[in-house]
Amino acid sequence: MLRGGRQNGELQIVIVLLGKKRQRPLVPPAKKNSTLLYADSLEAAMQKDGQQSSGYEYEPVGLDKKVHPAVLKLWTGEEYKVRGVFGLGGFSVAYRVRDQNGQLYAAKVISQRPYSTYCELNTLRKIKEHSHPNLLLLHSVGRLTNPPPGYTNEVIITEACGPSIKEIMLKARRETGNTAPCSFSMDNIKRIGRKIGEAMLHLEKLKIYHLDLKISNVVFTSNVKYELDMNLTQTIITMSNFDIKVIDYGSSMTHSKPGNPKPVILVQPRNMRAPEVFMSLPHNEKSDVWSMGCLMAELYTGKLLFCSNIMVPDSEKEQVHFETMISIMNASIPIEMIKESKQRGECTLNFNFLNDRKEANNQNSLMSLMRKDNDSPLFDLLKFMLVFDPSNRPSFEEVLNHEFFEGV
C-alpha cells in the first residue's frame, strides 16, 4: 500500500508492507510527454546522412529508437549526444552518451513510476569519496529539459562501461546457435570472482548493502573480446580482459546503526535471495555473500543455481523456491532461525516439509553439477558461501582468503 504526503516541503512516500514501513523521498515527475518528434529521435540521428549507425553492439533486442532522444539536454545548458542504449529497466533507461568534448558516459534517466534515487545517490557519493576500481564512479547529477516520454527529468551520469556478464553469455549463446547455456573457463571464474569479491568487500567497509548482485549487474569496463571453445560438452567463454565493475545501486541500503533495530524488508531478486530474507528475518552483512555464491555457480554452469519451476502458481513460488534451495544444498536450518521466523509472524513459508524430507537425491545436489574432479575447489568455495545460517556464513574477506582464489 502506498501513502503520499509532504514533509518539510518534500514529497514523501511511505510504503506499508506486512506492517513494515519505509519512508523515502519521491522524485518529482516531469511534465508528461506523450510523443517525441521523429526528427529529435535516436533513430533519426543514427540514419542521418544515410549513415545508419548500428549504435551500441549490446543494445536490448527489439529496441524502438523512435521513442528515445538523440540528445539529452540539461538545465545547465550541457548536452550529451546519445550513442546507444545500455539497457532498459523497470524504473530507468541507461543511455550511452558523449559530452561536448567527446567523452563517453552512461546516463541513467529515471521513469515516472514511484521510485526514489535517494539510496542510489547516497551509495554513488560514498563510492566517489572512497573510490574502488571495481565500483561505478559518479560523474554528475542533473535535470533534463527534454526527458523521454514516460520519464522524469532526473538524470544520473556515471562513467561508461561495456557489456554485462549476462550480455556476454547471451551473445555467445546466439553465436553458437545452440540452446545450451555458455559458461566461463575456470581461470576466468577465479579472476572475475575475485574482483567481484573485492568490490563487495569495499561496499561492506563503506557500510553498504548492495542487495541486487546478479550477472546483469556486473559489467566489463570496455567492449571486450572473447573466444569460444565449442569442442567441449559445454561451450566455454574465455575473456580477453577481466576488468569488471559491480553496478546498479538502486536497491542498496546503508547498514543500520548499532543499537537500532534492523528492518525486515523483502530484498534481493528471488533467484539470488538469501535464506534469512525468505524467512522474513533481517538482511545483514552476509546476505550479499549468498548472492555472490549464486553468481559464482552461474558463471560455471551458465544457468541459475536455484530456479523453481516457472509453471508454479505465483502463490507457491516462494515456498517451492525455498524448498529447491534446501534440496540442492542438502541443507538443514537451525531451529533458532525457524523459531525467530515464526515469532515475528511475517513469514509465509510452511516449514513442515522439513519433517518429511527423504534422503538427499544426489542427482539434484550441488555436487552433481561438477563436470570434472579438477573443479572441486570451486565447489568447496560454493559450499563455504552458501550456508543457510548467516552467522556461520563467511564474510567477503573470508571468501577472498579461500584457497580457490590463491594465486589470482
Image: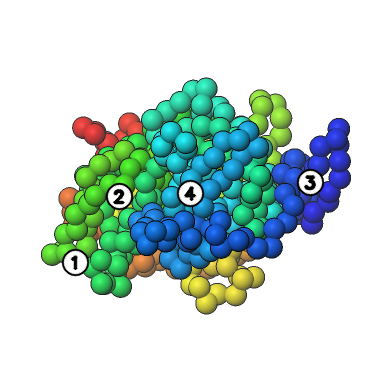
User: Mark 4 or mark 2, which has the lower sequence index?
Assistant: 4
SS at badge 4: strand
Disc 2 versus disc 1: distance between alpha carbons? 19 Å
Which residue is pictured at 48% across the width and 45% down the height?
81
User: Mark 1 or mark 4, which has the lower sequence index?
Assistant: 4
The reply to whether dot 1 and dot 4 touch (C-beta < 8 Å) is no
Which numbered marker is on residue 353? Answer: none
Q: Is residue 320 left or right of residue 237?
A: right
- Rendering coords of residue 75 (x, y %): 65, 37
Which residue is pictured at 35% across the width and 40% down the height?
221
Question: Which amino acid type corresponds to the residue marked 3 in the rendered image?
Answer: Ile
Question: Which amino acid type corresponds to the residue marked 2 in the rendered image?
Answer: Phe
- Rendering coords of residue 285 (x, y %): 53, 36
Q: Is residue 25 left or right of residue 87?
A: right
Disc 1 versus disc 4: distance between alpha carbons? 41 Å
Residue situated furthest bottom in the rendering: 311
Disc 1 versus disc 3: distance between alpha carbons? 52 Å
Disc 4: which residue: 82
Depth check, front residue: 48 or 130: 48
SS at badge 3: strand
Which numbered marker is on residue 379? Answer: 2
